[in-house]
Amino acid sequence: MIENIINFDKNLFIKLNNLGTEKFDFIWIFLTSTKASIPFIVLILYLIYKKYNNKSYQILLLLLSCICLSDIISVNCFKNVFMRYRPCYDPEIENLVRVVKNKGGLYGFVSSHATIFFSVITIFRLLFPENKITLIILTVWTLIVCYSRIYLGKHFPLDIIFGWFIGFLIASATYYLYKIIIKIK
């Protein structure tokens, strides 16, 4: 059963990864970079300040905690434990992978990009339930960044999907812990 899922994941990756062409590589390299996310970061910071004003520092601390936890957990509890090769290092398919730019670290399960981005949009959804349009924009942006990881040959689709799930759990747990701490004060 698990072997069938992994084979499906690899085949889906090959199809999605090979949709790319050299002509568009520079766009996807940019989209996966931190620079491309700056407008969204500024938007989130602005909305936090606008809604929470003198409590903005608490919300920023909450958001930074989620980002740091997402990074630490995705690497130390998943990549270094499961040790699933990135597609570009997988001996079964490495010759079929379009690798754009560099290969990155050896292991890719789960995607730190997916974990962090989904953690951020989960926190955003919890903090700004009324701001549906911005949530949709951030979700579309997250999907684009996550697809860029497949396009560039860095992650299998399941690396991304599990990253979303882990990011959701981290953000939800951090948010509810924050709410408990605020009530105690």
Image (cartoon, rainbow, N blue to C red):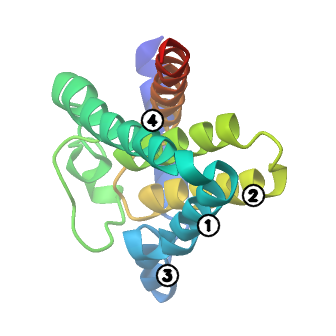
The tag on residue 27 is 3
The image position of residue 162, as x and y in percent, is 47, 30
Q: What residue type is labelled 1?
A: Leu
Q: Distance between the residues labelled 3 and 1?
A: 22 Å
- Residue 72, by quadrant, is top left
Taking the spot 23% from the left edge, 39% from the top edge, the residue there is: 85
Asked if disc 3 and disc 1 are in contact, CB closer than 8 Å, the reply is no
User: Disc 4 or 1, which lies upstream in sequence?
Assistant: 1
Q: Which amino acid does label 2 sit on?
A: Thr
Q: Which residue bears the numbered disc 1?
A: 43
Q: Distance between the residues labelled 2 and 1?
A: 9 Å
Vertical placement of residue 23 versus 18, above or below = below
Q: Distance between the residues labelled 3 and 2?
A: 23 Å
Name the front one of labels 4 and 1: 1
Could you say whether the residue bearing mark 4 is in a helix, strand or loop?
helix
Asked if disc 3 and disc 4 are in contact, CB closer than 8 Å, the reply is no
On the question of residue 94 being in view, the answer is: yes
- Residue 172, by quadrant, is top right
The tag on residue 163 is 4
User: Disc 3 or 1, which lies upstream in sequence?
Assistant: 3
User: Disc 3 or 4, which lies upstream in sequence?
Assistant: 3
Q: Which residue bears the numbered disc 2?
A: 134
Q: Which amino acid does label 4 sit on?
A: Gly
Q: Which amino acid does label 3 sit on?
A: Ile
Asked if disc 2 and disc 1 are in contact, CB closer than 8 Å, the reply is yes
